Image (cartoon, rainbow, N blue to C red):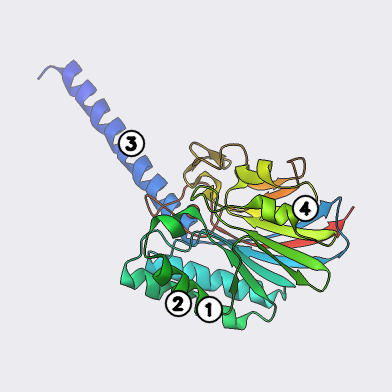
Amino acid sequence: MTPERQISRRRFLKSAGLGAVGAIGTFAYGDLTSSKVRLEQKELKLPRWDADGFKVAVITDLHLDYPEAVLRTQWAISQLAALQPDVFVIVGDFLTSAAPQNLENVRTALRYLDQVKCPVFATLGNHDYWVGYFDLVTQAITSANLRLLRNEVVDLNGVAIAGIDDDIAYKARPELIAEAKKPKSTIALFHEPDSVKDVSTDLSLQISGHSHGGQICMPGGISVHTPRGAKKYIAGFYPDAKVPLYVSRGVGTTGPNWRLFCPPEATLLTLRGS
Ligand SMILES: [Fe+2]
């Protein structure tokens, strides 16, 4: 081998080695960011809101198909319960497959809701329908200390919680929520954030998930791909949507059990009138 060829071979091996180290580092970082739930505490100013200081704990997209998802969900529930919210909400996608172990995971994780001292409400997401075995899935979900809302409104001493059923699964009836008599302070739970276009303007806030914040993102949390129903609204607070909208990155994962530059979140929203 000529000296020139020896040098270029050495260069190739060096750059291949650096590439492998970079790839391993990226995967390791991704693994770290998918396992550590970030506790997000936000104060939202809402134009239509009477109950100043009302606290809403939010988790969503639990995807309890992995033991780590159970641990992440339990951690999120415990942290939020300790912050003494006025209401605790779960906005769909409890699991991705209805294997018996996953149904057991739902029961195990949601048992931690016994720590929560306020009312707990939930709505369903597209995956909760797509997994099939609807009765088994909803039995596992409602085994916990929560009330599942399917196109209904409940009143909590002047604050209403409107649970709209899943849009992608063709179960959403936002018109029923629009027709219902509601107080000035009304929070809608609606899995898909982009479906905010279909809700009535008399809602104070919509809370959604579904996007996973993009799940695998570029540095700075810039999403590369989001699912149908989360193309326009991806993560965080959107005060200028049709009604003010908060989108959580969620707790779990779909596809690869992996996140990058997009940590899972447990959220406490403190709502302020503006
Ligand atoms: Fe999801």
Residue 119: x and y, percent?
A: 68, 76
Q: Nearer the viewer, residue 190 or 133?
A: 133
**Neighbourhood count class around disc 2 (C-alpha, 10 Å): few under 14, some 14–19, many 20 upward:** some
From the image, which quarter does the N terminus lie in?
top left
**Neighbourhood count class around disc 1 (C-alpha, 10 Å): few under 14, some 14–19, many 20 upward:** some
First in residue order: circle 2 vs circle 4 = 2
Residue 186: x and y, percent?
A: 78, 60
Q: Is there a contact, CB below 8 Å, between mark 2 and mark 3?
A: no
Residue that badge 4 annotates:
203
Residue sitting at x 51%, y 56%: 125
Q: Nearer the viewer, residue 179 or 84?
A: 179
Residue sitting at x 40%, y 52%: 28
Residue sitting at x 32%, y 72%: 100
SS of the residue under disc 3: helix
Inter-mark Cα distance, 3 to 1: 47 Å
Q: Residue 26: which disc?
A: none
Residue that badge 3 annotates:
19
SS of the residue under disc 2: helix
First in residue order: circle 4 vs circle 1 = 1
**Neighbourhood count class around disc 4 (C-alpha, 10 Å): few under 14, some 14–19, many 20 upward:** many
First in residue order: circle 4 vs circle 3 = 3
Mark 4 vs mark 1: give the one in front.
4
Residue that badge 1 annotates:
144
First in residue order: circle 3 vs circle 1 = 3
Q: Amino acid at mark 2?
A: Arg
Mark 3 vs mark 1: give the one in front.
1
Residue that badge 2 annotates:
107
